[in-house]
Image (cartoon, rainbow, N blue to C red):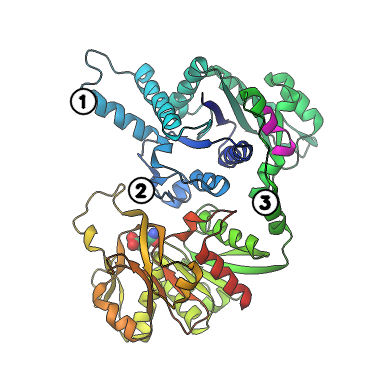
Amino acid sequence: MVKWVFVTGGVLSGLGKGMISASVSKLLQSRGNHVVPVKCDGYLNVDPGTMNPHEHGEVFVLEDGGEVDMDFGHYERFLDVTGSFDWNLTSGKVFQSVIDREREGDYLGETVQMIPHVTDEIKERFRDIAEEEDADVMAIEIGGTVGDIENMLFLEAVRQLRQEDEESVLIHTTLVPFLDTVGEQKTKPTQHSVKELEGAGLKADFIVGRSDDPLEEKTKEKIALFCDVEEESVISDPDIDNIYRLPLILEEEGLDVQVAEKLGLEEGEEDMQRWKDLVETMEDPSEEVTIAIAGKYTDIDDSYVSIDEALKHAGAHLDAGVNIEMVEATDIENGEVRVGEALSEADGVVIAPGFGSRGTRGKVEVARYCRENDVPTLGICFGLQMMTVEFARNECGLEGAHSAEIDEDTPHPVIDVMSEQLGVEKKGGTMRLGGYEAELESDTQVQEMYGEEKVVERHRHRYEVNPEYHEILEDNGMVFSGTSQDGKLVEYIELPEKRFYIGTQAHPEFTSRLESPNPLYHGFVQSVLDR
Ligand code: GLN
């Protein structure tokens, strides 16, 4: 029988529930359980694919082409599993299928209602996933905070499921602020949030208190008393610099042992040694490098999280600390800062993915500066496209060359919409999404890094290097080091005389995990260190 771990949150959002869910899952996995992570999001979008990073942080792309909540990035990076689009339940997805079923006649004779029809749909999906995956443990994170109207149906489904299937635990995450004026950790917000949870008919088995410093003994006592949990079940989750340390902290707090006990999971031998070693290297590396990410959502932390993490994974395997510096492409384009100045601290540069025109001129400037100064540079998706635009203008003499996405009237659309995208009008889930295979050219830097002839990486784009310009780009020294199977679509570019000037149409950051870094990112950080 499958066991259930539910993770909810209170007081405010952004407490890192995703990380907690990923960490608990990691610990249970390391004891030999097959853990499947699921995320529920209350919004009505079917998926986050059409939201921008200011709304939602990064959109994570799965192997199967699903655009999902960025918590899936944490799940995959921690658990080294490959997620499925079905594992991200949104209200949009759930309602859509209930309404479709009603039109099909699945509920003939009935009044279709939130309870039981929508809640049944949610439970059915949870159970279907458990069965399909043959899961020992389902780790289900409910997004948002208790009390939000949009999460009520998910919480109600959880309540019913706990009633029907006894073997479950609920971990509730809250904020425990430190009040300077009284010099004390305050538990009242936690108390209120637990009341709110109880109002939804749910009882917490564990309370994880997010705080600046570890929870004090008396804070734990008080939370235990007022929130009706054992004192040892109040878990401290203080601020940390390295998110990969969290499983180790939760382990020290005894969370995994208690969860396993409550669920009646078999006593497996826990194996976190390799993880521990990597975490320690990350925290005390022999060398440090600074890598700039030139992008346009630099005011929020979450916009390029998979890129940040992929760089750090590579660093952990190369005994190097990677300091990440955000460089705002819009500032360069507006002349607020000169490109050389903006990149003066950078040992290497990533040119970020993106959509739309803002920041484009800045990214082209960055590409030029890096090429001319032989700075190790990795262009991701739109980054590859801007490297190509710059190369076309300055090395191929194609004045005014651009991407047709940005300038429809460019005389040289070196980046153009893919033929398969012509006529695509709907915006939701219609890009070239998910894992596609590329064939790598022998004797190229890219092929050497991967050490394979064929690689699969995930994608999310509508535009490509225009086939009509392949010849002129190649004649001027650009090497297409990887193409799609039919040879038509450019997947990797490189300039062989540079130390590392490589772009990819894919997003290799989505497959990087702490325990197995992505080869391209690994090679990039290696080249930054060599420099
Ligand atoms: N906007 C570009 C395209 O659609 C690049 C997308 C991206 O960087 N992910 O092709």
Per the image, the residue denoted by label 2 is 50
Inspect the image, locate mark 3, and give the three-letter code of the amino acid beneath it. Answer: Arg
Residue that numbered label 3 is attached to? 274
Q: Mark 1 — residue?
A: 103
> In the rendered image, is residue 356 in sight?
no
**Secondary element at tag 1:** helix
What's the residue at 81%, 31% (across, down)? 217
* Residue at left offset 36%, top offset 39%: 45
Question: Closer to the N terminus: mark 3 or mark 2?
Answer: 2
In front: 238, or 313?
313
Residue 252 placement (x, y as % from top left) = 74, 38
The residue under label 2 is which amino acid type? Thr
Residue at 57 percent of width and 76 percent of height: 341
- Point out the tag, 1 or 2, that comes first from the N-terminus: 2
Quarter of the rendered image showing ligand 1:
bottom left
Q: Can residue 276 be spotted in the picture?
A: yes
- Which residues are drawn in magenta? 251-258
- How far, Cα to Cα, is label 3 from label 1? 52 Å
3D distance between C-alphas at marks 3 and 2? 38 Å
User: Label 1: how many residues lie within 10 Å, few (<14), some (14-19) or many (20+)?
Assistant: few
Q: Quadrant of the C terminus?
A: bottom right
Q: Secondary structure at mark 2?
A: helix
Query: Magenta stretch: residue 253 in it?
Result: yes
